[in-house]
Amino acid sequence: MGPVSTGQHRGLCLGLDIGATKTLGLVVDAEGAILAEVREPTEPGAEGVVRTAAHVVEALRAATDTAHVGTVGVGIPGLVDVEHGAVKHAVNLGVDGDWLPLRDLLGERLGVPVVVENDVNAATLGAVAMSGEDDLVYLSIGTGLAAGLVLEGRLRRGDHGAAGEIGHVPVDPSGVLCQCGQRGCLETIASGSAIAAAWPTPDDVPPARALFAAADAGDPAAIAVRDRFAAGIASAIRVLSLSADPRSVVLGGGVAQLGEALRAVVADALRAQARTSPFLESLDLAGRLRVVPADYPVAAVGAALLGRNR
């Protein structure tokens, strides 16, 4: 691990993006500039997650030459009880079963207040900061498929924390069984895991990148898989847009590392779906589409904003 830049400023905010393989921490100043960045492999299990987060925070404190960095915001996968700062069902982190009181455990260790949020919701706040829009849907295309919603400046979590679980909308009753227990969910068609299943590659080759490269080279099978994936993403955007009518739709997550290539094929799929519907065509869903730049740590930035907005 190590800092990529340093500085000493007032009004610093600290954000952590805790993932299954790595924990990324940032220090952000009052203008939103990233002053320091630290990555460390995430230790699995409840104690490992807390220990890793604490190590990253201490490294960031050292990198910014400051002993105290206000509230720490944390974005983490799984079911998050925001009021109590607890998480469960973060299976890829080895945190399942009982609630993990992450806010209290990490706060006691660091001696500062901690705010905990679902990682997709945190990334949605980062997308707001990146775009300057306060009315958007952030669609995270990673291993799964999920969305975050900021509507008229307010993050929408839902009464049961299920707002934006677009990946578990069933679209094919005869489709494959989803991990949620339903059959034919959008996630089984339009996600990183769906691409990996449809276009297997060696372990060191990202399946989405390999698929798009093969499609660009004219491979008919790759084109078919890519276009089915893009149509699934477009369907998710259509459902979200017809439900909430956001000003912008921002694509993020691991598959969004494809950048403009991803935006272009999804925009084409949206236009194709609207071709026979003057109503859909009038909404210009393709024109609302944006993609997170590959080098922008959207979830960690959003987590830092959690602390600022506390």
Image (spheres, rainbow, N blue to C red):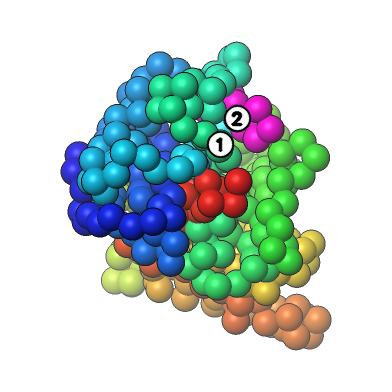
Instruction: Give whichever of 296, 194 is nearer the camera.
Output: 296
Task: Specify which label sits upstream in the sequence, 1 or 2.
Answer: 2
Task: Give SS at disc 2.
Answer: loop
Task: Say whether residue 284 is left or right of residue 278.
Answer: left
Q: Which residue is mark 2?
A: 85
Which label belongs to residue 96? none
Q: Is residue 161 above or below residue 292?
A: above
Q: Is residue 119 above or below residue 308?
A: above
Instruction: Give whichever of 63, 179 is nearer the camera.
Output: 63
Q: Residues within 10 Å of mark 1 (few under 14, many from 20)?
A: many
Q: Which residue is mark 1?
A: 116
Task: Say whether residue 202 is left or right of residue 120.
Answer: left
Q: Residue at x 60, y 46 (%)?
A: 310
Q: Is the C-beta separation of discs 1 and 2 under 8 Å? A: yes
Instruction: Give whichever of 291, 128 is nearer the camera.
Output: 128
Q: Is residue 150 above or below residue 47?
A: below
Queried whether the magenta region covers residue 231, the answer comes back as: no
Q: Is residue 264 visible?
A: yes
Query: Residue 188 at what x, y percent from top left?
Result: 57, 44
Kind of residue indicated by mark 2: Gly
Q: Residue at x 64, y 68 (%)?
A: 134
Query: Residue 197 at what x, y percent from top left?
Result: 44, 42
Query: Residue 150 at what x, y percent from top left?
Result: 67, 59
Q: Is residue 110 above or below residue 218?
A: above
Query: Residue 144 at what x, y percent from top left?
Result: 53, 43
Kind of residue indicated by mark 1: Val
Bounds of the magenta segment? 79-90
Furthest toward the top, the residue is 98
Q: Is residue 202 visible?
A: no
Q: Residue at x 28, y 55 (%)?
A: 8
Q: Quadrant of the N terminus?
A: top left
Q: Residue at x 53, y 51 (%)?
A: 308
